[in-house]
Amino acid sequence: MKRTIIQTVLFIVIVALGYMVYDSIMEPVRFNKDKKHREQIVVEYLKDIRSAELLYKQLNQKFTGSFDTLINFIATAEIPVVKMIPDPTDTTYTKTINDTVGYVKVADSLFGKKSSFDYHNINIIPFSDNKPFELHAGVIKKGGVTVNVFMVRASFKDFLNGLDQQTIINLTAAQNDIDKFPGLEVGSMTEPSTDGNWE
């Protein structure tokens, strides 16, 4: 009887230790899976913001550093739909005539196929408890040329909110050690680039 109790207790201890070992191995695996999933969603937001900024610049000759301005632009601005036809007076068939045949709303152009997407919240980082993306725009000189630039950022601590805190701190410290932004960003305020740091 006593031996059976000891064996039962030992079995429970072995199972508990086994589970603790398994859980400690699986914790970083789960973290990386959640991190990858969240990064994919945040990257989609950054791509959408970049597309909106590029259209804004196309129509306004500069980027905007204000989400209010960008969201209003998405909601109200229209893009001309241009049809190119051959110039009937050109016998070489190299000249074309651009004919504006209509206009398309920016919101429909960018997000028409994303039925569940609400661009009014494009400034909010997913998973962050409603923290906004960091958005900047301005002008820099590069090679003697004035260039319009913009940058949008979301830090690990914001979009990994709710995951293991120590792992987020370690991840942030590792990025800082190699002089990289600890998170996801698109564009640059020092280079004429519209690339994302995930690309």
Image (cartoon, rainbow, N blue to C red):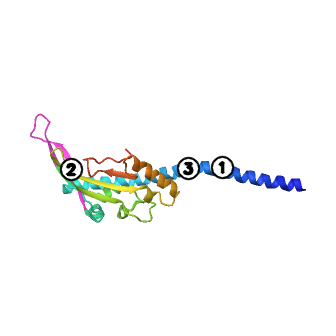
Q: Earlier in the sequence, mark 1 or mark 2?
A: 1
Q: From the top left corner, tell me how far across and down residue 26 is, in percent.
A: 60, 49
The residue identified by callout 1 is: 21
In what element is the residue under mark 1? helix
Front-most of 37 and 100? 37
In what element is the residue under mark 2? strand
The residue at the far top in this view is 92
Identity of the amino acid at label 3?
Answer: Pro
Q: Nearer the viewer, mark 2 or mark 3?
A: 3
Front-most of 35 and 13? 13
Which disc, if any, is residue 28? 3
Identity of the amino acid at label 2?
Answer: Val
Which disc, if any, is residue 88? none
Inspect this view and state whether residue 95 appears: yes
Q: From the top left corner, tell me how far across and down residue 129 is, in percent.
A: 45, 65
What range of the chain is rendered magenta?
77-98
Is 17 left, or right, of 150 in this rendering? right
The residue at the far front in this view is 177
State the CA–CA distance, disc 1 to disc 2.
63 Å
Front-most of 183 and 5? 5
The residue identified by callout 2 is: 82
Q: Earlier in the sequence, mark 1 or mark 3?
A: 1
The image quadrant that residue 71 belongs to is bottom left
The residue at the far right in this view is 1
